[in-house]
Image (cartoon, rainbow, N blue to C red):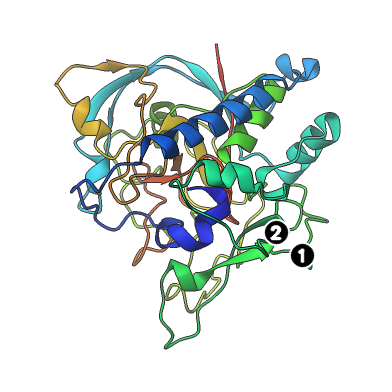
Amino acid sequence: MIRYTFSILVLSLLLSCQAEQNKTAHDHATPSMLQGHDKLIEKYLAEINAIPLDSASLLDYDYMTLIPGATFAMGGDNDQALPDELPKHEVAVDSFWMDRTEVTNKDFKEFTAATGYQTIAERELDPEELLSQLPPGTSLPSDFDRSPLSLVFSNVLKGQLANPNTWWKPVRNANWRQPQGPSSTIEGKDYYPAVHIAWYDAMAYCKWRGKRLPTEAEWEFAARGRRNKQVYHWGNDMITPDRGNYWQGEFPYTNEVKDGHERLAPVMSYMPNTYALYDIAGNVWEWCSDWYKYDHFEERADNTVINNPQGPTTSFDPLEPSVLKKVMRGGSFLCNESYCSGYRVAARMKSSPDTGLEHTGCRCARSL
């Protein structure tokens, strides 16, 4: 979603693990809005391409694991599967390397110190960029505040209306250095995942490290850890507090914190999957390289094996037809069985590439 207007336009979907999707297409974006998106995408990609490689990282495979290529059944595994996870279909992926953990604050500090990079959440809002993505004739208020902002989770009091508009709060100067805003800090949290990371930020970090974001197919294949056609990376048993960082209790009112982590957990706090990948279930949503298209699995379900799919060439979500989105996987510390089972290996999430939140981060991959 457009970063500058996310608190107004589509907050109802930011955390959503996608309540059943309405496949009735709404009106599509106007040509002028799409052109605005295209220009913004080109601008950010050009900035990413200009980031120099860290030569030391090119030969560094520490904290990475080799994922041997194979064919697997991609898509939803049980009755929790949503329409965009279906149908299940055969996919083949080549061997590749993948980071064992999510990118940490320590990792991101090294990146920003070496390059001077500022995340999207740290940048002032640009009225011209905003207007270029909105319908002609749209105007901003004369007192439009350009201060950087991002979304921070806030518990909802029992009895109050509960929806993403009430549990996500736009907070000025919230970013990866200050996850809950200026009064917070990451001091002493080097090995926690970096959050408020937009897709562009994740791409920039990967570029510097000589890596890339995994495709959605690679992510799911690696997350399954040789457990094809099972719901979680450990099998089919329900998630428990010793298996991942998620919300225990009644969401979004009461977090019982049975796992000891009210919000983020340090990486490697839980047992890895069989490929030695940590935090595949919960903690933070992780960006993939693919564009999101709600019916893309249907498009490629023709009973033939799909080799190394890169995702659709276009993005379309009928719930927000004017918003171009990228895929996220893995769930977060806010996922809950009664509301959001995003820690299932087939669960999908999506958001615009310039949006970061308190529970979005990334993990890198590398081709052989």
Residue located 36% across and 63% down the image: 337
Q: Residue at x 45, y 27 (%)?
A: 215
Residue 55: % across, % down: 79, 15
Q: How crowded is the residue under tag 2: few (<14 C-alpha within 10 Å), some, or many (20+)?
A: many
**Inter-mark Cα distance, 2 to 1:** 9 Å
The residue labelled by disc 1 is 184
Residue under label 2: 174
- Residue 180 in the image: state x and y as whole percent: 69, 64
Q: Is residue 235 left or right of residue 289?
A: left
For the C terminus, give its image quadrant. top right
Residue 128 numbered mark, or none: none
Left or right of 74? Residue 335 is right
Identified at 62% across, 43% down, the residue is 128
Query: In the image, what residue type sits under mark 1?
Result: Ser
Asked if the residues shown at circle 2 and circle 1 are in contact, with their CB atoms under 8 angstroms apart, the answer is yes
Residue at 37 percent across and 17 percent down: it is: 308
